[in-house]
Image (cartoon, helix red, strand yellow):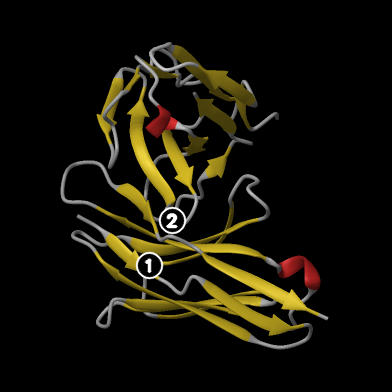
């Protein structure tokens, strides 16, 4: 099976940098994704890492270390609108089809 | 493109009733999934489909049925609703289900079973 661990809540102030960590266990690893969800709305895709290293997309970066089964999402220049839940998700599986398993989510609270 | 659409947005059922949650996408995606989201539990995969006529179980399939007769539609059927099925249900689609695929989520259906 697949399982992921991430902190339940993180707080930060506007303009700061915050890192949300994710550790995972899976068989047949394909990659690690990050999704953002505002107030129970539809989750939206942020980033994907299949190989070790850092991927940068604007203010957001995502890192993966496959040997450590670990990744993180880095949010820079925090804005109030970044207050949301962030989910890491691992794509894996040993059968012919892969599935996406989500962590329980990290609620990020950004204060003025 | 409308993307992924779900109906209804809200539903209240009594224990033992059956219903179908509708999901449709207009992006010609092969891979579609149903998730449920409960407080503190993240998104859990119920069933998924890799193309018309092909479905498989996810992490929490009991009490739910799916079918995929067309590429566009992937309905989720609750056979006999139970209070434990009170949840928010999200449908998602992606081009092929491959590693780098972005999953596009619908707006969700909020279901309460009394």
Q: Quick check: can you spot residue B109?
A: yes
Do the residues under discs 2 and 1 have CB atoms within 8 angstroms?
yes
Image point 42% across, 72% down: which residue? A6
Circle 2 packing at 10 Å, graded few (<14), some (14-19), many (20+), is: some
Quadrant of the image occupied by residue A58: bottom right
Residue carrying label 2: B100
Residue A50: mark:
1
| Chain containing mark 2 | B
Asked if A46 appears above or below B113 in the picture, the reply is: below
Q: Nearer the viewer, residue B85 or B94?
A: B85
Quadrant of the image occupied by residue B100: bottom left
Q: Where is residue B27 in the image (x, y as percent from the top left)?
A: 58, 30
Image point 58% across, 30% down: which residue? B109
Q: Residue farthest to the bottom?
A: A16
Q: Where is residue B110 in the image (x, y as percent from the top left)?
A: 58, 32
Q: Quick check: can you spot residue B91?
A: no
Quadrant, the N terminus of chain B: top right
Q: Is mark 2 on a helix, strand or loop?
A: loop
Q: Where is residue A43 in the image (x, y as percent from the top left)?
A: 58, 50
């Amino acid at each position: 099976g697949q399982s992921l661990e991430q902190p339940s809540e993180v707080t930060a102030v506007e303009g700061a940098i915050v890192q949300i960590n994710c550790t995972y266990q899976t068989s047949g690893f394909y990659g690690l994704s990050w999704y953002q969800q505002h107030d129970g709305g539809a989750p939206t895709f942020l980033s994907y890492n299949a190989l070790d290293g850092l991927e940068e997309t604007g203010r957001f970066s995502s890192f993966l270390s496959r040997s450590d089964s670990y990744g993180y999402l880095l949010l820079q220049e925090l804005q109030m609108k970044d207050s949301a839940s962030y989910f890491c998700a691992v794509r894996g599986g040993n059968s012919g089809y892969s599935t996406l398993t989500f962590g329980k989510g990290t609620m990020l609270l950004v204060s003025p | 493109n409308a993307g992924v659409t779900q109906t209804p947005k809200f539903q209240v059922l009594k224990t033992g009733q059956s219903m179908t949650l509708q999901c449709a996408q207009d992006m010609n995606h092969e891979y579609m999934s149903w998730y449920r989201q409960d407080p503190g539990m993240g998104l859990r995969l119920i069933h998924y489909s890799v193309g018309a006529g092909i479905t498989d179980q996810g992490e929490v399939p009991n009490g739910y049925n799916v079918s995929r007769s067309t590429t566009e539609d992937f309905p989720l059927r609750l056979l006999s609703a139970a209070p434990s099925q009170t949840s928010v249900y999200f449908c998602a689609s992606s081009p092929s289900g491959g590693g780098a695929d972005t999953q596009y989520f619908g707006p969700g259906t909020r279901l309460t079973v009394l």
